[in-house]
Image (cartoon, rainbow, N blue to C red):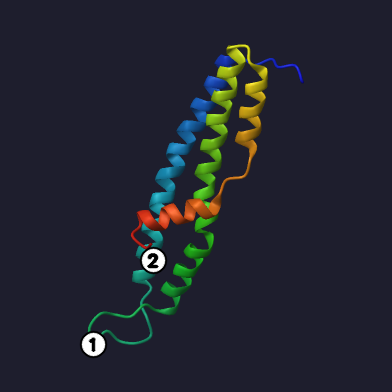
Amino acid sequence: MPAWDISPSGVESVTSLVGLAMDDMAKDIKAYGTDVESAATSAGTISGGDCGKVPTGPVGIALALFVDRTMGDVLSLGARAGKSVNGAIEATNHYLRGDQEKAAIAQRNAAKAVDVEALLEAARKKGGKG
């Protein structure tokens, strides 16, 4: 097993900074969603709106497709950061208790890929689409 030399205060400092960056990222992602929706509805369409609700035009459709196809990437950014921060904290806590084996397990678990499909399913349920 490799030797460990963890500075708990250093881990706390870095995870705190990452937490602040995650908060900023969450605000940016929310603004992104609002801005894309606004752009899609403002883009207009070729046909007129004389017969009720104005249909979505080609730009709005393209934006909706773009968001749909990139949603997994966007959601995984926050999930990946959160998993890394939580893993670092968990590994450090095990290290401080003298359990390097559990620290190594926490570190390996934090490095595993995020389940993007589960994130998408949860986001769609939260958004009322499923």
Q: In this rendered view, identify the residue nearer to me: 31 or 11.
A: 11
Q: Is residue 56 above or below residue 112?
A: below
Q: Residue at the spot x=62%, y=16% of the render? A: 95
Residue 8 vs 81, above or below: the answer is: above
- Residue 33 lies, in percent from the top left, at 40, 57
- Is residue 125 rendered to the left or right of residue 87? left
Quadrant holding the N terminus = top right
For image coordinates 54% across by 36% down, the residue present is: 83
Circle 1/circle 2 CB separation < 8 Å: no
Instruction: Please tell me whether mark 1 sits on a helix, a strand or a loop.
Output: loop
* Picture coordinates of residue 105, whole percent (x, y): 65, 28
Say if residue 32 shows up in the picture.
no
Residue at image mark 2:
39
Q: Residue at x 56, y 49 (%)?
A: 115
Q: Is residue 112 visible?
A: yes
Residue 31 in the image: above or below residue 79: below
Residue type marked 1:
Asp
Residue 18, numbered circle: none
Where is residue 6 drawn, in percent x and y? 64, 16
How many numbered callouts?
A: 2
According to the image, label 1 marks what residue? 50
Few, some or many C-alpha atoms within 10 Å of disc 2 (few <14, some 14-19, many ≥20)? Answer: some
Q: Earlier in the sequence, mark 1 or mark 2?
A: 2
In whole angstroms, how far apart are the C-alphas of marks 1 and 2?
A: 21 Å
What amino acid type should be assigned to the residue bearing mark 2?
A: Ala
Left/right placement of residue 99 relative to residue 32 reads right
